[in-house]
Image (tube, grey):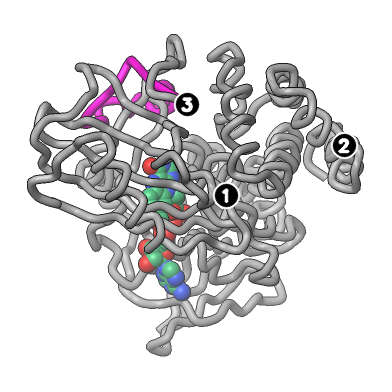
Amino acid sequence: MKRAYDVVVIGSGPAGLAAASACASEGLRCACLAPAPAGGWQQTYACWVDELADLGLDDLFSHRWHDVRVVDGQRRLAGQSYGLIDVPRFQQRLLSACRAHNVDFMPGCALRIRLRPGGSCDVLTADGREIHAAVCIDASGRGAFAMPRQAAGSIAWQTAWGIRAEVAGHPWPDGCMELMDFRPVCADDQGPASFLYALPLSKSEVFVEETVLAARPRVPVESLQLRLRQRLEGMGLRVLKVVKTERCEIPLNQALPRRAQRVLGFGAAGGMVQPATGYSVARSLAAARPLALAIAQGLERGGSPGRASRAAWHSLWPGQALRARSVHLFGLEMLLRRSAADTRAFFNGFFALPAELVRDFLAPTAPTTRLIHAMLGAGLHLKPSLGGSIAAFGISRAGRSLMRNLVSNAGGTP
Ligand SMILES: Cc1cc2nc3c(=O)[nH]c(=O)nc-3n(C[C@H](O)[C@H](O)[C@H](O)COP(=O)(O)OP(=O)(O)OC[C@H]3O[C@@H](n4cnc5c(N)ncnc54)[C@H](O)[C@@H]3O)c2cc1C
């Protein structure tokens, strides 16, 4: 079967539905192909409150915390609020927007993409269908169906094990959550530095997760499962009933797609995971409308698919986003070379910075000057031996490569 669309989106996660609804609301004829287009999302999504507030979506939070603690359960990120997204409501909101603008949902799996001479493409599905569209958006998540892959050994992973549980009380006052409690699980803790992420949902329910921010090779989730149990026991937090478990494995540094290619990468498939946090949902939501506008303008008045793709790539990766990614990747590489003790010491210094600077570093993108300011500022709070070894890393090959990237992306999208 052949059908002509302006846009076909592969994937119906947050990125796919955000892209499909935004494209359709710009008047583009849009199809969305995924194995189960309305299948329930399982992840526990959260982000900074202002990220959804800026998009007029802050009614999607089920919980908010205005007292965000870091490092040792005492230190606060002043003026920052964090929120837990009501995932079923979030998904329904995007699905409704898609349906309201007549997105054609197609259950199925993309197998291959065939580019046509004029620049449009056919998506070939596992069950033998062909979907013909001017522009194809790959939003197929970390598997990145149509995007380039890199050697598995070079990938750095965030791993976590979490539970949503009924508990016999917990230590957090109202409005307080732990973003990264880096205290060791026990006095002779020998493992990689992991932290507790804790979202108190009521006086008797919590979501708690033990996370290794970044490691290469990947830390097995099972070891974090054990650590979480030990940590909760050490805190005297008694679990009465586990309501839900969450296994989390996020590749942090997947290769950016080549931006000369026709197929657009979006969300986790498009390298939009922030390498320093593993987050991408808020960025995908914010980027969906500019992406849709760029495609619509590119196709206007008989514009070619190639023109639309180029405009779309530019909207996704302006110079600032490319530079921010280079700095975040540099920070990631620096972190991957630290021992557990040095990782804890580094975050002790990092979270001693003014909260706005910390937030800028953790945001999807920020001006390079702010990011470098944050890295240098964190260095000033470190003991000389650690500061010295980080400075040495800064002038190593990684530092020189960062400088090259900053210079080559200085003027905007290449
Ligand atoms: C457990 C967990 C918790 C996370 N929590 C957060 C968080 O709190 N905040 C945050 O910002 N990020 C979080 N992340 C990271 C990231 O934002 C998520 O991975 C997010 O789901 C990425 O969205 P996406 O739409 O790009 O991809 P996905 O959600 O992975 O969606 C991919 C879609 O593509 C479909 N698909 C795959 N292959 C094909 C194919 N060949 N053909 C057709 N369809 C295909 C899939 O079925 C799915 O619909 C978390 C990740 C995990 C794993």
Q: Residue furthest bottom?
A: 128
The answer to whether the beta carbon of the residue marked 1 is less than 8 Å from any atom of ligand 1 is no
Amino acid type assigned to the residue bearing label 1 in the image: Ala
Tell me which numbered mark, 2 or 1, is placed earlier along the sequence. 1
Count neighbours of disc 1 (C-alpha within 10 A) and say few if under 14, some if 14 to 19, many if 20 or more.
many
* Residue ID for mark 1: 214
Q: Is residue 414 magenta?
A: no
Residue in the picture at 32% in, 48% down: 228
Nearer the observer, 244 or 54:
244
Element class at badge 1: strand
* Residue ID for mark 2: 392
Residue 71 badge: 3
Residue 233 locus on image (x, y percent): 24, 43
Residue 163 locus on image (x, y percent): 24, 49
Q: Work out whether residue 413 can be spotted.
A: yes
Tell me which numbered mark, 1 or 3, is placed earlier along the sequence. 3
Residue 368 locus on image (x, y percent): 75, 26
> Which residues fall within the magenta stretch?
50-71
Residue in the picture at 61% in, 27% down: 361
User: Is 61 located above or below residue 262 in the figure?
Assistant: above
Screen quadrant of the C terminus: top right
C-alpha separation, residue under disc 2 versus residue under disc 1: 21 Å
Nearer the observer, 183 or 371:
183
The image quadrant of residue 207 is top left
Looking at the rendering, the quadrant in which ligand 1 lies is: bottom left
